[in-house]
Image (cartoon, rainbow, N blue to C red):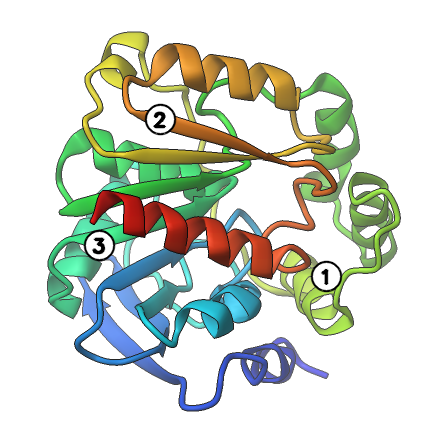
């Protein structure tokens, strides 16, 4: 199967009645998967590096009954978005997200991100360029702690010279052998090995002063078995650095089982956080 065909298979797992829209921005056309009532409070889901909007199918299915769920394919990653100019820095992604939400006319959103998507969500909230009602960061990277050297040792060969076997071995190692969805896995592998990728965007941790000034109600969900970083350190740092934060641990989750395998628990956490914000 081609990448596009595998994308269609994975996108078909989104809830019945879902649709897709292509939104023009100055950074290129952005493909967005959409579910839920048009007038409901919007939840925007930002995938991690190397993934696509399709990864949120389970979360979207659980949230679409009461939220307007929108998940874009981020420019520079595999997916159906097109890049019109290079994405060189997190500031470029923040500018893209600001344009996208303005074009969608969402108003204030519940902003959710996983991994590098969590870094983008946090950066956008700190910049104040997007109207954010609440923030949910799922096993966030480069936000409160650095990557584990062991994780980087396994990940760098996959980034430099990806092969299907190498990508599958890396994911099997990080997930501890938990059986991930085969459609998601096939699409991830195809994206890593057959999709033309943009240059890697380097991320930097936000400053302590910046984090201390964040006023958006924030939920940090830590994958208890994540190999991307030290989960305990992420939790401790988030509590120490953010003035308005709740931190919860998903004991059985790893960095790459989020958000697909743990979708029901994640969706409940997102909805509960939105309810507390009001």
- Residue 155, quarter of picture: top right
Identify which residue is drawn at 58% across, 80% down: 13
- Give coordinates of residue 121: x percent, y percent: 33, 41
Disc 3, disc 1: CB below 8 Å? no
**Residue closer to the observer: 83 or 257:** 257
User: Is tag 1's residue or tag 2's residue first in the polypeptide sequence?
Assistant: 1
Residue 155 shown left or right of residue 274 in the figure = right
Residue 2 shown left or right of residue 38 in the figure = right
The answer to whether any part of residue 93 appears in the image is no
> Mark 2 — residue?
245
Q: CA distance from mark 2 to mark 3?
A: 17 Å
Identify which residue is drawn at 67% across, 41% down: 159
> Mark 1 — residue?
189
Q: Quadrant of the N terminus?
A: bottom right
The answer to whether any part of residue 127 appears in the image is yes
Tag 3, which secondary structure? strand
- Give coordinates of residue 66: x percent, y percent: 32, 72
Q: CA distance from mark 1 to mark 2?
A: 35 Å
**Residue closer to the observer: 272 or 207:** 272
């Amino acid at each position: 199967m081609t990448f596009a065909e595998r994308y269609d298979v994975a996108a078909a797992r989104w809830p019945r009645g879902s649709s897709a829209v292509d939104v023009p921005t100055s950074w290129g056309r952005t493909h967005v998967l959409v579910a839920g009532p048009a007038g409901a409070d919007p939840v925007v889901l930002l995938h991690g590096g190397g993934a696509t909007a399709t990864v949120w199918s389970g979360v979207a299915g659980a949230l679409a009954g009461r939220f307007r769920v929108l998940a874009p394919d981020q420019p520079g990653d595999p997916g159906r978005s097109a890049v019109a100019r290079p994405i060189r820095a997190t500031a470029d992604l923040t500018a893209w997200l600001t344009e996208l939400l303005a074009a969608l006319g969402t108003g204030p959103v519940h902003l959710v991100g996983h991994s590098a998507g969590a870094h983008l969500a946090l950066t956008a909230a700190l910049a104040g360029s997007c109207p954010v009602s609440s923030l949910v960061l799922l096993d966030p990277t480069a936000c409160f702690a650095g990557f584990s050297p062991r994780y980087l040792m396994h990940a760098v060969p996959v980034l430099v010279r990806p092969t299907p076997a190498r990508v599958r071995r890396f994911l099997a190692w990080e997930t501890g052998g938990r059986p991930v969805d085969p459609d998601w896995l096939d699409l991830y592998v195809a994206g890593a090995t057959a999709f033309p990728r943009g240059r890697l965007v380097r991320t930097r941790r936000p400053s302590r002063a910046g984090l201390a000034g964040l006023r958006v109600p924030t939920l940090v969900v830590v994958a208890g078995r994540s190999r991307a970083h030290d989960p305990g350190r992420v939790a401790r740092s988030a509590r120490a650095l953010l003035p308005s934060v709740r931190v919860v641990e998903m004991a059985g989750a790893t960095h790459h089982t989020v958000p697909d395998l743990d979708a029901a628990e994640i969706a409940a956490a997102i909805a509960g956080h939105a309810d507390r914000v009001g």
